[in-house]
Image (tube, rainbow, N blue to C red):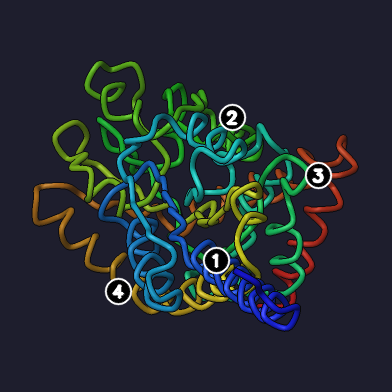
Amino acid sequence: MLISAHGVVNRICVGAALFSLGMSSATLAADDRPYVMKIALATVDDPLHEFAKNYAAAVERDSNGRIKVEIYPSSQLGSTQRQAEGVQFGEIQCLVVPPEFLTGIDERFEVLAAPGLVKSMADGQRLAADPAVLQLMLGLGADKGLHGGALFMVAQSAIVATTPIRRLADLKGKKIRVFASQFQTEAMQRLGATPKPMTLGDVLPALHDNAIDGAVSSVAVFTTMHYWDAAKYVTETGQPAIFGIAEFSKKWYDSLPSELQQIVERDAASQAAAIDPWMIDFNAKARKVWTDHGGELISLSLGDQSAMLNKLASVGEDVSKGNPRLSAAYQIVTEAARRIH
């Protein structure tokens, strides 16, 4: 059968059009494929977990389901160090954690643990929203596989203990768990205690075994993790402030289409701001839950509180002065702290 040149051209054009349509459909299908975001954290039913849940809902909604979020609280994906490594290498897509626990990646992550930066939740919320502080903190770890997403105030510190700490002198000789932070270690030493850096998952067993006498964290964590079974005395020192940071895997973030990158970042920032009123209310309710379960809340006398702040006033400067990068970061956050007061 003879086919005209015109017919051949028509068939080629139709074939090319069909091929192009097929390629466009394949490209569209590839662009529409779901991306999984695993969010890891050490705590459960606390402010960090609440942020993770709110953030997950926002991302799934705004991405129209193109990002599927899975949340793994209570260190289900390993210790905090293991979670951080998973984020660096792309096995975990997001980690929500106090920034001090990332000091193994960059020592500047601990700078917000310097005592005396803030004196209230409102102060901490303003500090976490300061543009210079955000630029500093969310930029850390960019050369080591991290992409900063959000920063927010969680709580003011307290010390849970097996025996009551009613006076500053009661800390002398006590073994107290601290975050992995030079600032917290130095502060505890100045108060006469022996600091024991420890991940959250190890704290409750250590209290039960009398390996430590107490631990620094927040009333919210002590309450949600039922610490009253091991130690019922909580002294509310207020120092240092506890912040939360959301870090993405840079490898995963870079793999996202630009419109999904924008959603991931925009929702992280908006949820960090939106949770502020909830944080204040939750911390107040946690105090009541603690006492309802037989726990005791203790406040230092005005004299002891003032003496504590005086002892800790130079911790930030003294710890950071031998490290130019840490010193520069400390200056950024102290300047911001002066602006918010």
Question: First in sequence: mark 4 or mark 3?
Answer: 4
- The answer to whether residue 290 is left or right of residue 14 is left
Residue at which label 2 appears: 189
Residue 306 at what x, y percent from top left?
A: 55, 56
- Mark 4–mark 2 Cα distance, whole angstroms, equals 32 Å
Q: Nearer the viewer, residue 159 or 81?
A: 81
Question: First in sequence: mark 2 or mark 3?
Answer: 2
- Evaluate whether residue 123 shows in this view: no
Residue 297 at what x, y percent from top left?
A: 25, 53
View extreme (right): residue: 324
- The answer to whether residue 283 is left or right of residue 334 is left
Q: Are the residues at dot 4 and dot 2 in contact (C-beta closer than 8 Å)? A: no
Q: Are the residues at dot 1 and dot 2 in contact (C-beta closer than 8 Å)? A: no
Residue at which label 4 appears: 281
- Mark 1–mark 4 Cα distance, whole angstroms, equals 41 Å
Comparing marks 1 and 4, which lies closer to the viewer? 1
- Mark 2–mark 3 Cα distance, whole angstroms, equals 20 Å
Question: First in sequence: mark 1 or mark 3?
Answer: 1
Q: Residue at x 22, y 67 (%)?
A: 285
Residue at which label 3 appears: 326
Residue 120 in the image: above or below residue 209: below
Which image quadrant is residue 232 in? top left
